[in-house]
Image (cartoon, helix red, strand yellow):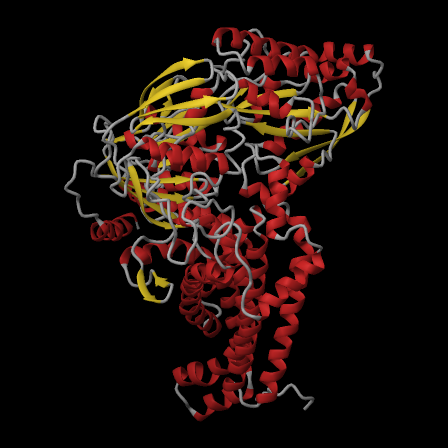
Amino acid sequence: MKKLIAAFVGSMALAAAPVALSAEATKELKMAYDADPVTLDIHEQLSGGILQLSHMTFDPLLRWTSDLGFEPRLAESWERVDENTMRFKLREGVKFHSGNELTTDDVKFTFDRLKQSQDFKAIFKPFSGINVIDDYTFELVTSEPYPLLLNTATYIFPLDSEFYSGQTEDGKDKSAITKHGNSFASENLSGTGPYTVTERKQGVRVEFERFDDYWDTESPGNVGKIVLTPIKENNTRVSALLSGGVDFIAPVPPNDLERIRNDKNANLVTMSGTRIILFHMNQERVEAFKNPKVRQAIAYAINQEGIAAKIMKGFATPAAQMSPAGYQGHNESLTPRFDVAKAQQLMKEAGYEDGFTITMMAPNNRYVNDDKIAQAVAAMLARINIKVDLKTLPKAQYWPEYDNRAGDMMMIGWHADTEDSANFYEFLTFCPDAESGSGQYNAGNYCNPEIDALVQKANVETDLDKRAAMLQEVEQRLYDDAAFVPLHWQDLAWASKKNVKIEPVLNVMNFPYLGDLVIE
Amino acid sequence: MLAFLVQRISQAFLVMFVISVIAFAIQDGLGDPLQEMVGMSVSEEEREAIREELGLNDPMVVQYLRFAGNALQGDLGNSYFYSKPTLEVIAEHLPATLELVIGASLIIVFLSVPIGVYAAIRPQAWLSKFFMGVSTVGISIPVFLTAIVLIQLFSIGVTVNWFPSDTGWGQWLNDFFTTEGGLPSYGRSDELTHLFGTWESGFFTGTGLMHLVLPSVSLASIMLPLFIRLIRAEMMEVLQSDYIRYARAKGLSAGRINFLHALKNTMLPVITVGGVQIGIMVAYTILTETVFQWPGVGLMFLEAITRSDIPLIVAYLMVVGLIFVVTNTLVDLIYGLVNPTVKLTGKKA
């Protein structure tokens, strides 16, 4: 049986062997992600998939290093001109896939387009404009001093202004951003990045080829071709790696970590992530949640370490705050407080010794083990006599319920697009205000104007040490107030074949710098 | 014949109408498609604007009438995710599914007929008993389990050392159960032969066939036992009938009796059941395609549901409905050809 199959497979493999390329970057990488980019227009949607695509086919002005510092890319250097202005020097001689050369006109074009994008314009709100000085010098201007200017600049991936301007054959504007329906930019692409897209079948496969005129000749990357296959099913993705069908997979489901770690041909990389999973306690729906003692009791009743160890199989970092390590607001002194006796005591003090009944909602296919986590939390609350009526829903049905604040306690996971703590507070704990959009996902209706004011003050503080102190104080006060129930930061995991050196190109933002990937 | 067709076509329209109404009625429970289309931090105002643009704010009846009006002109709307006409998206995914169904059907036909006939002719042979035993097991194993086991055995491979390897027989047994793996575990091959239009096939290249093996076997595994048992039972019954005894008495050769006279009558009920099973197969392709990341309509449909891609869901249901109606009609026609005594007109005869 074994020999027969081996012979058959062998002959097929020979027939399918690829013709070796003559260029230096000759290796081929087959990778399987859980999804493929929904569009080639990198300004159409702000999502992990699109950022991964952006880093493969475009290049940002600057990018994050693995320890959350900055590294110059298309911008060679930058300096602060005044409180509101940062001057950038653009790298010279950079070519787009179309052959056009990169100049500040392209950066301006990109900046203006980002301001139009429904998904990105919120991030670029603090910017009042861009000043073009010469072909390779420009300034980004904010309306107020803005400490996150560089964080935001990592989202500027210059587009080829000539390529994206004008009209298509059927008279459509090439620069249009269309959320649904075909646009020129959603099917054509010209960036400065290491790869060009050569073939794309949505939901089936995307093929990338290394761009011959890529500016970064220092890059050690030797991958000439990448084939991306979206595989949503966890088992199938892992099998594809173990059977040698693909070289690189992400994400690795927690249940298969051991299996991959034990496989002698596979290489597993894990990292503590930056996506916080938490529960909101809705004070408008439940009178008791208005009482800080009840909220604290809940915080004491929940065993974050236990959930991370048992349900997440160690594949999560227990949290007592929103900011992960590395973020400015991360407050070292805050650790999970699990103490059932203390929780019961607090319930008694608050006058709810006999407990009460609440409803709880969570998605069941959005975050890792989301429904199991919710069940565990419900069971933990039972120990302080809070009876939970739990409902879990697929994400497509969950989010409309979330927007309606349909449960007394609701789960949400959040990753800060700016890689900064303030983003968490603005969306998750600010006093909800439909007009300004602040507190848009604050399903707890928690409201503390003092804390909001402190965050706003931090947001115009360009002295980063002072700012960090302010944000850490915010975390402390939210913790003391038990404004929400933090659970954990989801860890990240990737796996590859042994000869694919993924570790140096991975980062907590989960956009691998595949241009620098080395295959031995 | 004509009356039969007219009746069937009007039936088809009724079925399509009912399906479209149901698809529209469940729309509210499918969730908000905006969640997949925009980032989390997009403001409610922006969302509202897109919803308005997509016509999601209109009353259901208005949405349905707009849909029905377009549908009558052959336009089933644009998929939110693929940004293309839904029929085009389905047409692109259909070849992969049909290829899988054809692959599975070939396995079923080429295995079930000889095995079923053999088991009927020689019911007491140990081989017949073996096949019957295996098929009982086969019926009761869910398709995704079959798929996972197949992937482990033939894609990843297993090393067996249950037997003492220092003895000759132990080594031989270990080797016998050890599998090397290497068969593709997901997706279609890169090398597809272009046939016509958007139609590409993996039937003509080595890697294309390799990619088909595990998914087709998994899909076939559900139907194969059923057909073996059905053919065996029918065949045994036919072999008891008078005209077979008469043929034997006349001294016709066993082969002629079994394969010409008996098999022909055996196949009648098998074809009817087969027609119904094609519909069930559509449901099972969803499972199989999911496990094998097979880029067909089943996987497309499942993902459309998680994305709340409502136009695509509705279009898929319509197309599957149409396939059901067409295959059932064809089955009736074939039935008529195999057995001309059956009346097709549908009139009370």
The residue sitting at 61% across, 37% down in the picture is A364
Quarter-of-image position of residue A476:
top right
The residue sitting at 33% across, 36% down in the picture is B164
Left or right: where A86 falls relative to A144? left
Left or right: where A242 falls relative to A353? left
Left or right: where A348 falls relative to B284? right
Quarter-of-image position of residue B322:
bottom right
Image x and y of residue B144, in percent: 50, 49
Image x and y of residue B147, in percent: 45, 50
The residue sitting at 38% across, 31% down in the picture is A495
Number of residue marks: 0
Residue, far bottom: B250
In this view, B17 is above or below A418: below
Residue, far left: A22
Viewer-nearest residue: B200 or B63: B63
In this view, B290 is above or below A322: below
The residue sitting at 59% across, 10% down in the picture is A335
Q: Quadrant of the C terminus of chain A?
A: top left
In this view, B197 is above or below A502: below
Viewer-nearest residue: B58 or B97: B58
Image x and y of residue A265, in percent: 31, 32
Image x and y of residue B139, in percent: 54, 58
Residue B329: tell me if it is visible. yes
Residue B343: tell me if it is visible. no
In this view, B198 is above or below B9: above
